[in-house]
Amino acid sequence: MVLISACAGFGFFGFYHDAIKLDELDGNYRTLAACAYARLSRQLTGLSRTEGPEQGVIRIGQTAGGDAWELAFVNAESGQQTLLEWTGGAYPSEHVLSTVRACAA
């Protein structure tokens, strides 16, 4: 039983962090994640976008270089709000966060 719950807790990069809420953004999580991915993928290498088995969550992460990170875009308030959560790796740079926030502006 312990082994199963330990394996279920591993995140995107093979290690676990509790989700930390960074921001609550106006707009649909799908729209914001698509915008953020499009803008960030022009500037960063090793970027990936996944929609996990859980409904209402899209993850964008970077695995290239020494600063691997992951952000989760979580559906809130019936698609009107998006919770932005840091769920793994190094804390995202201010450039990444400001790019994501610009998508909601």
Image: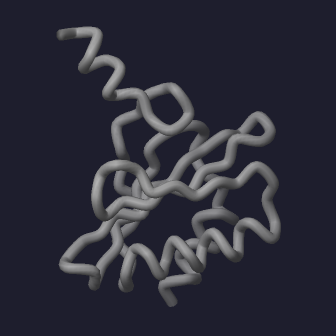
What's the colour scheme? Answer: one colour
Q: In which quadrant will I find the N terminus?
A: top left
- Is residue 61 placed above or below 5 in the rendered structure? below
- The x, y position of residue 94, in whole percent, is 64, 61
Q: Residue furthest front?
A: 53
- The x, y position of residue 43, in whole percent, is 81, 66
Residue at left offset 38%, top offset 85%: 27
Residue at left offset 51%, top offset 71%: 33
Viewer-closest of 32 and 101 = 32
Residue at left offset 52%, top offset 27%: 14
For residue 69, side relative to residue 57 (left or right): right
- Is residue 78 placed above or below 43 in the rendered structure? below
- Is residue 38 placed above or below 55 in the rendered structure? below
For residue 91, side relative to residue 3 (left or right): right
Q: Residue furthest bottom?
A: 105
- The x, y position of residue 34, in whole percent, is 56, 75
Q: How many marks?
A: 0
Residue at left offset 46%, top offset 50%: 86
- Is residue 27 placed above or below 55 in the rendered structure? below
Task: Indicate the quadrant where residue 98 lies.
Answer: bottom right
Viewer-closest of 1 and 68 = 1
- The x, y position of residue 10, in whole percent, is 41, 28
